[in-house]
Image (spheres, helix red, strand yellow):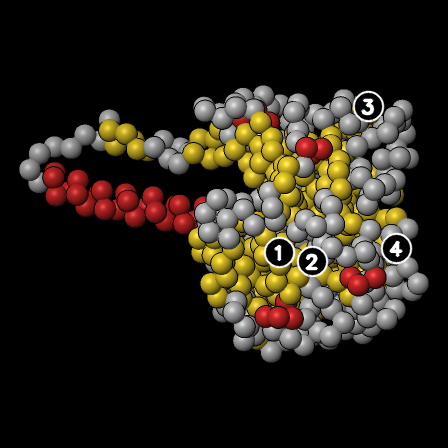
């Protein structure tokens, strides 16, 4: 994240290649097994007949065990601290049941040390819990099982101290991911980006980090084969990997074990101070949507990453309140192979919340860096997201770090999606629905909702979180948080609910 002044520049990043995700590895393994099996069956068929085989489609089942990590950006400082908000929410149309051998249980522990955090241990579906992470924790590890695992979500909110540039940072707590992309970190003198790796298991984990900057791949120090001890967190300053770089892209690959990955970016640049979590960007695709471009912010920069070996020709369409339009200077963007293009977002994008749709002839990913300047300056990062396929959760209450903020729910539609209706439900700390409204989203447009002012919600009580039901309708969801502490952006993803079982082959 950079606190540079408006005017912009173009940088190059070399993501090298599009990594194979975990599910892709599983598919390749299944294919390999089937090829070998096919060869054996052919040989056997020369001697005798072989019964036909049937491959069943993959099936889904409720998650039986879920682990997630809520990192703390700077423990042991005078920062106002990090609070955690968590709960197992009610899922629309779902009736999760306990997995075999998995009793309903939720455990919260502080890392390092493993001390229990009793105030965050969910005991019933719907309840919303909040507690400070403490000034010694590097992360809080949340593990749930049985019927408490599906729908278990957690978020962190940090009011950073002066040493981290101040400001407000809000993030979803991370689950294990084989491959992650983060765009917008810095390692210059006044930037303090941190990579946080949390081992979710009781076995050692190993990660590889590749970094890319304006001139291409960066020669990082000790970035290959980073070992994270069981049930522990490792915090790595980006400047310790490579110094003096702006707008650094990180590609984190988990080589062994289960790791939750997060990146915290802070700026102490005079007049452009602030902090935020850099959310993981969506995997490269020919269409990307970056939601929650905040109005009345300065220094807004779109970063488009092309990890392939062909030059990308991209156009950017603004999904505004009145529908899609193309902003001046964003109608044609060329991104060199294995690089990142930085494009200033013009003022014509408007004074209302918008989303940017990047359409490219080759797969790309993207993020938007934005900052507010002045005495109460802060920074926010919006990463490319994916549409909801089920129920998403937007927290409104995350302890003292996120007390009584102004929250804006942002709904952005894909350009080719049909007009659709999205149901938003406001829930209190017990999970009880205290208000409900339906929001219509037109193709290629962005709609915002202020829960405190919406007449249909007509909230009679303090609300802890919103559930958003937008299953498979091409709508991306995000939240914008504004308070005296600063501004933050949170992308909303599906609440964890099911896991896909591998395909089964049976003889006919």
First in sequence: mark 4 vs mark 2: 2
Residue underneath mark 4: 351
**For the residues marked 4 and 2, what is the alpha-carbon distance in whole angstroms?**
28 Å
Residue underneath mark 2: 264
First in sequence: mark 3 vs mark 4: 4
> Could you tell me how many numbered marks the image carries?
4
Residue at image coords 71%, 61%: 265
Residue 301 or residue 310, whichever sits in front = 301
Are dots 1 and 2 in contact, CB under 8 Å? yes
Q: In which quarter of the image is residue 392?
A: top right
Which of discs 4 and 2 lies nearer the camera? The answer is 2
Question: Around disc 1, counting alpha carbons within 10 Å, would you say few (fewer than 14), some (14 to 19), or many (20 or more)?
Answer: many
Q: In this view, does 398 lie above or below 146?
A: below
Residue 219 or residue 466, whichever sits in front = 219
Residue underneath mark 1: 196
First in sequence: mark 1 vs mark 3: 1
**Quadrant of the frame with the N terminus:** bottom right
Residue 41 placement, left or right of 361:
left
Question: Around disc 2, counting alpha carbons within 10 Å, would you say few (fewer than 14), some (14 to 19), or many (20 or more)?
Answer: many
Residue at image coords 47%, 35%: 500
Are dots 1 and 3 in contact, CB under 8 Å? no
Are dots 4 and 2 in contact, CB under 8 Å? no
């Amino acid at each position: 994240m950079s606190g540079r002044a408006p005017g912009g520049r173009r940088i190059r990043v070399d993501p090298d290649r599009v990594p194979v995700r975990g599910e892709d590895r599983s598919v390749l393994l299944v294919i390999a097994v089937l090829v070998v099996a096919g060869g054996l069956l052919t040989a056997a068929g020369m001697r005798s007949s072989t019964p036909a085989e049937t491959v069943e489609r993959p099936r889904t089942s409720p998650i039986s065990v879920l682990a997630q990590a809520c990192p703390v950006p700077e423990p042991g400082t005078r920062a106002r601290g990090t609070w955690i908000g968590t709960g197992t929410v009610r899922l629309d149309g779902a009736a999760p049941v306990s997995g075999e051998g998995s009793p309903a249980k939720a455990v919260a522990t502080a890392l390092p040390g493993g001390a229990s955090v009793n105030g965050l241990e969910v005991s019933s579906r719907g309840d919303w819990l909040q507690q400070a992470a403490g000034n010694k924790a590097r992360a809080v590890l949340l593990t749930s099982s049985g019927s408490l695992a599906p729908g278990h979500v957690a978020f962190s909110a940090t009011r950073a101290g002066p040493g981290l540039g101040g400001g407000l940072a809000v993030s979803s707590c991370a689950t294990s991911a084989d491959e992650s992309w983060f765009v917008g970190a810095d390692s210059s003198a006044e930037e303090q980006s941190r990579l946080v790796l949390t081992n979710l298991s009781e076995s050692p984990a190993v990660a590889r980090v590749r970094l890319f900057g304006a001139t291409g791949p960066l020669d990082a120090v000790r970035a290959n084969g980073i070992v994270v001890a069981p049930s522990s967190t490792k915090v790595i300053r980006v400047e310790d990997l490579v110094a003096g770089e702006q707008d650094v892209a990180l590609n984190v690959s988990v080589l062994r074990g289960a790791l939750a990955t997060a990146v915290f970016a802070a700026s102490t640049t005079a007049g452009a101070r602030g902090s935020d979590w850099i959310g993981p960007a969506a995997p490269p695709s020919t269409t990307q949507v970056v939601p929650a471009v905040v109005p009345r912010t300065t220094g807004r920069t779109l970063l488009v990453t092309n990890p392939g070996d062909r030059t990308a020709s991209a156009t950017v369409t603004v999904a505004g309140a009145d529908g899609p339009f193309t902003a001046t200077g964003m109608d044609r963007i060329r991104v060199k192979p294995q690089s990142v293009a930085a494009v200033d977002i013009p003022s014509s994008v408007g004074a209302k919340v918008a989303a940017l749709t990047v359409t490219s002839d080759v797969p790309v990913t993207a993020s938007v860096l934005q900052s507010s300047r002045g005495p109460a300056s802060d920074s926010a990062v919006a990463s490319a997201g994916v549409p909801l396929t089920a129920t998403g959760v937007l927290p409104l209450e995350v302890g003292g770090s996120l007390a009584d903020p102004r929250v804006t729910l942002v709904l952005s539609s894909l350009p080719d999606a049909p007009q659709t209706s999205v149901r938003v439900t406001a829930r209190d700390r017990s999970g009880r629905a205290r208000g409900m409204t339906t929001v219509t989203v037109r193709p290629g447009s962005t709609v915002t909702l202020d829960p405190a002012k919406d007449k249909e919600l007509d909230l009679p009580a303090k609300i802890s979180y919103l559930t958003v039901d937008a299953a498979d309708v091409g709508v991306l969801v995000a939240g914008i948080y504004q308070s005296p502490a600063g501004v933050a952006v949170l992308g909303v993803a599906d609440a964890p609910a099911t896991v896909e079982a591998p395909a089964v082959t049976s003889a006919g």
